Amino acid sequence: MNQHDSERISGLLDADGLVSVQDESDADVIVLNTCCIRENADNKLYGTLGHLKTWKAEREGRQIVVAGCLSQKDKDSVQARAPYVDVVLGTHNVHRAAELMQYARTNGSITEIYDEAVEDEYILFPSALPARRGTSYNAWVTIQIGCDNTCAYCIVPAVRGKEISRPMEDIVREVTELAHRGVTEITLLGQNVNSFGRDTTLLARQAGGSNRVRPLFAELLTAVGAVGGIRRVRYMSPHPKDMRSDVLHAMAETEAVCEHLHYPLQSGSDRVLALMHRGYTANRYLERLKEARALIPDLAVTSDFIVGFPGETEDDFVKTLEVAAEADFDATYPFIFSARPGTEAATMTDQFIDPGVMAERFARLNLVVERSALRKHQERVGRIEEVVIEGPSRRGENVTSGRTRQSKLVHFVLPTPLRAGSYALIEITRGGRHHLEGELREVLFESTHRTNVPFSVVA
Ligand code: SF4
């Protein structure tokens, strides 16, 4: 979400006549789009701002902009700590970036943070905002902002506000426009995508409309998957407590929807899940997973874990290992717990786990997951997989990387280069823990688009 906001800010500045440069010494403007999900975001921000103070003093007219959820959280304190920052904006007024920079040029520095989403063009017509996307063949598409959940470790509800769904027709229109521009793969983005539409149908019910909360995310998947030219649809992230059969059926029945489910478990202990306020049990999670695998052949499943949540005992952690083994994941993204100021978990200091214990548990969890990942990847040897070309691999000069529908990274050598966004059939020759290797069998579709060099996100 944060990276997509960066794309939108870049697009707005492009539309305002600015041109991106690779070297900060050539720049007139630097935007730091912060993300406080990351650890030490504030240290990184203020460290970078300290360095940029000199950069700004070197040339008249330079501007520094700080955006994102850290500025939303810290409000006036960014300019109090770094008064030379020209513009501070929050998560609800990304669309104002260019106007605020213009304002600051004539009137001096400004902080503008909206406490809640406002009914403006960003919410109602986000596709009207230009976006400079990092690649030409795939795109993130926001379907919802904010989150109505209260996970004890998470700062998102505080900095992104309550859940607001975008109108479905607006999303489909954006996807159609992207397809016309040559995008073949889209990722629907939201904090809790499978509750998409719940807010709008509840509002409709309050207004005397239908009593039925419609299964809007399933409908959205079907509608987006039907857009001509879109070969792959992905989404992130669903919440296990809101996963319903209709979504799994829509995945199974919509050809473009990829056979990949990122399904964040976080912990295998019901006690810890309750402390986290996750709203499901390990059993319910496993049952839904079983249903998903029965409906969707060759489904890859990945997950997130938080290791060492305050109060997690050895027994709790063993349950996590057991559930992880039973879930038979293709990959996971485990995080060692670290407190985010402003969250409930950050106040549970008397139950914090020793860092050494957390590191040891982290390693044990990785062992369990890597075992299943390696076995699954080795089972793919000999198969022919459809792969979208991502570009040169870091593994060697002649090696190219691509991604399968299951979101698995594949490395292979091409006799002649193919542009990013091209599709090919690759025979898998080797399976490692984190990637596959293969050989080209057939080029399916050659992209004619150039890919921009992706920009980096600072904090
Ligand atoms: S569902 Fe939980 S973890 Fe995800 S954004 Fe909402 S509060 Fe955070």
Image (spheres, rainbow, N blue to C red):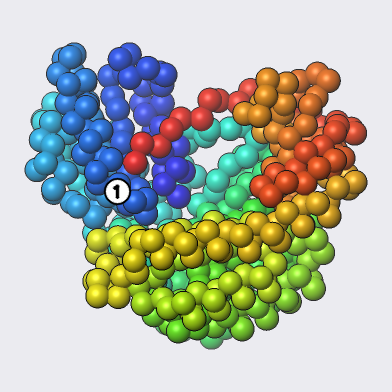
Question: Residue 453 in the image: x percent, y percent?
Answer: 53, 25
Q: Quadrant of residue 213?
A: bottom right
Residue beneath disc 1: 40
Which percent across, then down, holds residue 189?
A: 53, 54
Residue 36 visible somewhere in the drawing: yes
Residue beneath the point at 66% across and 47% down: 434
Q: Residue at x 64, y 53 (%)?
A: 234
* The image quarter in which residue 329 lies: bottom right
Name the residue type under label 1: Asn
Please identify the quarter of the rendering in which residue 445 is found: top right
Counting from the top left corner in percent of width and height, residue 320 is at 55, 74
Please indicate whether residue 368 sits to the left or right of residue 350 in the image.
Answer: right
Residue 173 in sight here? no
Front residue of 241/270: it is: 270
Give the position of the C terminus as an image quadrant: top left
Q: Is residue 231 above or below residue 29?
A: below
Residue at image x 24%, y 75%?
350
- At mark 1, the secondary structure is loop
**Above or below, 294 relative to 298:** below
**Left or right: residue 261 compared with residue 346:** right
- Say whether residue 22 is left or right of residue 407: left
Q: Nearer the viewer, residue 346 or 96?
A: 346
